Amino acid sequence: MIGYAFMGKAHSNAWRNVASYFDVPAFERCVLVGRDRDGVAEAAAKYGWAESATDWREVIARDDIQIVDICTPGFMHAEIAIAALAAGKHVLVEKPLANTLAEAEAMAEAARAAQEEGVQSMIGFNYRRVPALALARELIVEGRLGAVRHVRAAYLQDWLVDPDVPMTWRLNKDTAGSGALGDIASHAIDQVLFLLSEPVTEVSGRLHTFTRQRPGAAGLEEVTVDDAAWVMLTLASGAIASVEVSRVATGQKNSLKLEIYGDKGALLFDLEDLNELGFLDATLPVREQGFRRILVSEPEHPYLEAWWPQGHVIGWEHTFTHEIRDFLVAVGTGTQPSPSFEDGLSVQRILAAVEESAAAKGSLIQLTPSARTTQTTTEGA
């Protein structure tokens, strides 16, 4: 695994626990890679990795390494992933796929070439592995909502409300690619694609930076990414999705809310109550209609047969365990994991279109469907 900060910690926890709860191919946690020799050595010991290293190129050249998990900032994704795939390693990379559309296209092309040699790759949109959202997709696929007409998605955080929060790599376009757009709108947009299983044809958007300078090592430094984004998406069926994201929404810590409205029903989800799904069946008589709460904790629900008795809820960290489970099963069976780099590229095209639209004051951007299509799946069972 390359990278050991926030995502490295989350992934390490998943690699440590996955085999205790799911039947997966046997593996060993060999090497944790980071730039700081002392820091990565300490993290490797803490998180249960056998050894640590500072040169990812040397590590991916090793014969005893078959999987590379990339948890670095976005500007490093393309170089590492393409090199690892060329070396014959299966690759898991955190979202968004890359910092630029050109990098994402190169990664998807490398993944296609590698798959022809039996080498698999996957992008880590972990919210696809929330059992309630996997159940939501099942209900949509089963037709319980009828024709979906519109979706509302809002992903709100407040960690940048204080203008004295110091500069980090996440606030620099060279290292982060974008701000709230790539960081959290990518999750929300991927959920729209995941739940509705259809491509986006039109995009419009707006970006805004509320605090343009923050304290850094050189005094006040320029913030070169967005603090918030507003996006409108038209899907191939004609459904409309609105996406709002912010890292300056006072009082909102990690709130991803989704509302999906069809002509036969509707669904509500809130990440801060991730074990619950609201469902309204509009085929019932009006006098019986109303949103009902589904506690998604039954063994019949996606992924939950591996965990606790009914009603014993799971948490945010379990989504990464489910992600690693699905990746390992796909690698073990020689099948394409989902979401693929091609799926990540689809999100990247939308992110790029939002930036283009915002630069043109919200103009409508047409997206041409890719000639290649990928199949999006929930948990394999």
Image (cartoon, rainbow, N blue to C red):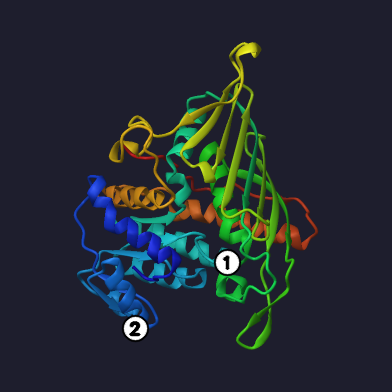
- Foreground of the two, 92 or 360: 92
Q: Is residue 306 left or right of residue 288?
A: left
Up-down relation of residue 228 to residue 145 (above or below): below
Crowdedness of circle 1 by 10 Å Cα count: few (<14), some, many (20+)?
many
For the residue carrying disc 2, how many other residues have a C-alpha within 10 Å: few (<14), some (14-19), or many (20+)?
Answer: few
Q: Nearer the viewer, residue 363 or 161?
A: 161
Mark 2, secondary structure of its residue: helix
Q: Amino acid at mark 2?
A: Asp
Residue on which disc 1 sits: 100
Of 374 and 23, nearer the camera is 23
Q: Is residue 268 visible?
A: yes
Distance from disc 2 to disc 1, alpha carbons, whole Å, reads 32 Å
SS at mark 1 in the image? loop
Name which residue lies at 43% across and 56% down: 123
Q: Which residue is at a point 61% across and 34% down the rendered structure image?
A: 260
Q: Is residue 322 above or below residue 135?
A: below
Q: Residue 330 appears at what percent x and percent y?
A: 30, 48
Which quarter of the rendering shows the N terminus?
A: bottom left
* Residue for badge 2: 38
Residue 102 location, x and y as percent?
Answer: 56, 66
Q: Position of residue 65 (x, y in %)?
A: 24, 68
Snapshot quadrant of residue 221: bottom right
Q: Is residue 119 visible?
A: no
